[in-house]
Image: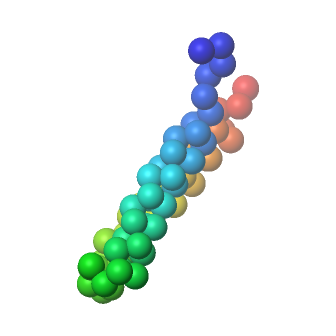
Amino acid sequence: MAFQYSACYYGVMANAFVHIWMYLYYFFAELNLVNRKWGGVFITPIQIIQFIFGFVLVRIDIFSIP
C-alpha cells in the first residue's frame, strides 16, 4: 500500500457490517421467518455502538492531522 488508511475507513467498514445484518434481518422478518421484536433488541444496540465507534474514529482523525 502506498498510502495509509484514514481511521474513518474503519467506521465505514463497521457501517457496512451493521447494514448487512440489518437488511438480512429485514429480509427474514418480511418472510416471517424471525420474530419482529428481535430487531429492536439486537439491531438497535449494534447501530448505536457502530455510531459511537464511527464518531470516535472521526475525532481521532481530526485531532491527529499534523
| Quadrant that contains the C terminus | top right
Percent x, y of residue 58: 62, 47
**Side of 50 where 61 appears, left or right:** right
Q: Residue at x 51, y 52 (%)?
A: 16
As rendered, which of 22 and 28 lies closer to the eye?
Answer: 28
Percent x, y of residue 43: 38, 70
**Side of 58 where 45 appears, left or right:** left
| Vertical comparison of 18 with 6: above or below | below
Question: On the image, which quarter does residue 60 sit in?
Answer: top right
**Side of 9 where 49 appears, left or right:** left
Q: Residue at x 27, y 79 (%)?
A: 34
| Quadrant that contains the N terminus | top right
**According to the image, what is the colour scheme of the structure?**
rainbow
As rendered, which of 1 and 21 lies closer to the eye?
Answer: 21
Percent x, y of residue 65: 71, 31
Can residue 56 be seen here? The reply is no
Name the residue furthest right: 66
Percent x, y of residue 30: 40, 82
**Side of 19 where 6 appears, left or right:** right
Total marks placed = 0
